[in-house]
Structure formats: C-alpha cells, structure tokens
Image (tube, coloured by chain):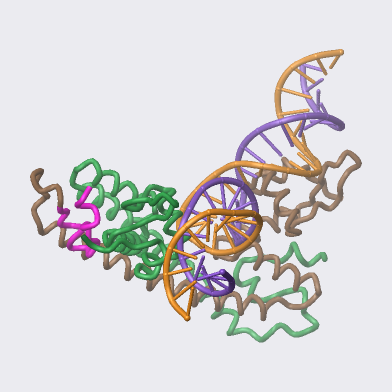
Chain colours: A green, B brown, C purple, D orange
DNA sequence: CTAAACCCTGAGGTTGGCTTGAGAGTCAAC
DNA sequence: GTTGACTCTCAAGCCAACCTCAGGGTTTAG
C-alpha cells in the first residue's frame, strides 16, 4: 500500500499548482483516489503520471478538451490509437499552416524593414509621412488630417 | 463636401461589423467625424482607410493596443517610424521563435506518427496499451487501472 | 496550546477581440 | 401611417486555462 498524497504534495511533485489540480478535477481530468471526511483530497502516484501526461500533451498543443477525449475513450476500455492519430494528424496539418503563415508574415515584415533601412530617417519637417509605413502598405493617410 | 457614412454603410464598405466599429470607438481607435442629435454616428472616407489600416496591421499580428500606440504617436505630430520599427523588430523576433517552436513540435509529432505507422495496430485484446502513446512518451500507465 | 501551514468551497477575475442581447428610439419606403 | 430596417446605449457573454480572493476549517510542529 503506497502512501497517498495530499494535494499540496502532489502539487510539488508534479510541478502544478493546487488551483490547477482542482481545476482539472472540475473538468473531470483528474480525480483523487479518495476524499476524506474533512474534504481533503488524496492522490496516489498515478496522479503524478497523469499530470505529466497532461503537461506533455499540452506542450504538443493538445487542448484540455482533446486530452479529455483521449481519457474518455480510454475509460470506455477502447484503444485510443485511432483517436490520437486523428488528433496528431490534425495538429500537424494545423502546425504546417501556422508555420506557413508565420513565415509569410515574417517575410513581409522583413521586406518592410529592409525597405525602411534603405531610406533616410524621416526628417522632422516631414512628419506627415512615415516612409516605412508607406512602404508597408499601411497607409497613414487617415492620420494626416489630425 | 463628401457624403458622410452612417455606421452601417461604413460597416459594409470596410467589411467590419457595426459592433466592431463601436468597439474600436470605445478603445479610441476610431471616432466618427460627427455625431448627430439623435446619437447617430457619421463617418467620412478616412474611416474606411483607418479600418483598412487596422485590419492590415492585425494580419501582421499587431494588437489593437499596439495599433493605438502608433495612432497616439501620430496624434502627437511625431513620426512613427521609430516606434513602428521597434514593433516590427519585436514581431520578427517573436515570429522566429514561434516558427522554431512550431517546427520542433511538428517534427516531434511526425516522429510519433511514423513510429506508430511502423507498428501493427493495437489488437482488440490489447486495449490496455496504445503503442503510439507509449512511443510518444505519453505514458498511459495512469489509465490502465481504470 | 498555539501559530503557521495546510486544506476546503464558491465565486469572481484575467486576457483580447470581439459578439450578443435587451429595450428603445429613428428613419425610409410604400 | 405603419412596417421593417436601421440606430442607440449599456451590460453581459464568449473562448481557454487558469489565478485570486474571501471566509472559513484542519493539521502539525514546537
């Protein structure tokens, strides 16, 4: 019989705040093995593993809802591979899109910066136009009338 | 004297909802040129440009707060180049980090998927272990006891 | 025995960029 | 003159993943 952990001990061992643990419980992601008369939650070592699982999945961009899906399927006694593979495929696709978009945005911003660098700084008498912003296509016409 | 636009007309021309326009006003990002006795807002064409500016800046990942900074500096009558350059540099740096992280995550997920593909599907009698998840390092020990 | 350290519940706040709703006034067309 | 489209204000809700606070009860070390 292993020693049970109080929530604060679990918190320290899993590097997760007690508030987070209770929050996860409210989402049915993690339940204590027992709850004492005084209301204290008690956990076994599996709770640590479970929290690690959650954290690992989160770094892979799984939402808590998705993680719960996995737990739910597992609870049914069914293999989770299919679900997890679907989720992973979705993540990869989404990441690819994000990387593409981020790269495009970065290129755009760099273009703007470069064309700015090639120009003299705005001189004080020319406050109405910011060459960078004009290059950028971020027209400031709307601001000139101020 | 150009025709002034009511909020709904501006909304259509700028492809932004009226609620969003009013929201921007609450943030002092966009003010009507005049407000009638009945409370109706009236805008000129600059409002369209300004909304386009905001949308363009948003696609470049500028927050409304940052956009407002630019407007504020502009309102002071000062050139915005320095600020915008600072903001752009920050965006690029942040995007680089994001791209790196996203790529790393993608690689990780692909590794998981590959090692999963190289293995047979879980067979029904083996519901306690999902090889994918074990490969992944997402231990499911915590779930086996269910 | 007492004080610190822990635990509880329940409700509310945070962030950003909106959206939605209630309840009411206004305007344009027929 | 009435109907329907538009407008107003103010307040609240939404998403995610928590955090914080108030106002208690409990445990444990010295």
Residue C24 appears in which quarter of the rendering? top right
Query: Which sits in the foreground, C3 or B117?
Result: C3
Say if B38 sits above or below A92 in the image: above
Query: Which sits in the foreground, B62 or A83?
Result: A83
Residue B74: where, in percent of width, then height? 76, 71
Query: Which sits in the foreground, B44 or A13?
Result: A13
Quarter of the image for the N terminus of chain A: give it.
Answer: bottom left
Locate residue B9 relative to residue D26 in the image: left or right. right
Residue A58 appears in which quarter of the rendering? bottom left
Residue at (37%, 51%) from the top-left corner?
A35
Q: How many marks?
A: 0
Residue at (68%, 44%) from the top-left corner?
B19
Residue B108 appears in which quarter of the rendering? bottom left
Residue at (75%, 85%) from the top-left corner?
A123
Read off the magenta span: B129-146
Residue B114: where, in percent of width, then height? 17, 61
Residue at (40%, 70%) from the top-left corner?
B99
Residue D21: where, in percent of width, then height? 64, 61
The question of residue A138 being in magenta is answered with no
Locate residue C20 relative to residue B40 in the image: left or right. left
Residue furthest to the right: B37
Locate residue B13 relative to residue D16 in the image: left or right. right
Quarter of the image for the C terminus of chain A: give it.
Answer: bottom right
Can residue B92 be seen at all in this image of the molecule?
Answer: yes
Say if A57 sits above or below A78 in the image: below
Can residue B52 be seen at all in this image of the molecule?
Answer: no
The question of residue B137 being in magenta is answered with yes
Query: Which sits in the foreground, A115 or A82?
Result: A82
Residue D17: where, in percent of width, then height? 45, 58
Say if A142 sits above or below B128 in the image: below
């Amino acid at each position: 019989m292993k020693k049970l952990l109080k929530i604060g001990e679990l918190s320290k061992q899993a590097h997760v705040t007690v508030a987070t643990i209770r929050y996860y419980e409210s989402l049915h992601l993690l339940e204590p093995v027992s709850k004492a008369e005084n209301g204290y939650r008690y956990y076994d070592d599996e709770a640590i593993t479970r929290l690690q699982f959650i954290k690992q999945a989160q770094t892979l961009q799984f939402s808590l809802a998705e993680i719960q899906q996995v737990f739910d399927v597992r609870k049914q006694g069914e293999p989770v591979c299919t679900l997890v593979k679907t989720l992973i495929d979705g993540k990869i696709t989404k990441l690819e899109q994000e990387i593409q978009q981020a790269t495009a945005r970065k290129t755009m911003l760099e273009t703007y910066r470069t064309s700015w660098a090639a120009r003299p700084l705005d001189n004080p008498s020319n406050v109405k136009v910011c060459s960078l912003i004009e290059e950028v296509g971020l027209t400031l016409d709307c601001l000139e009338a101020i």
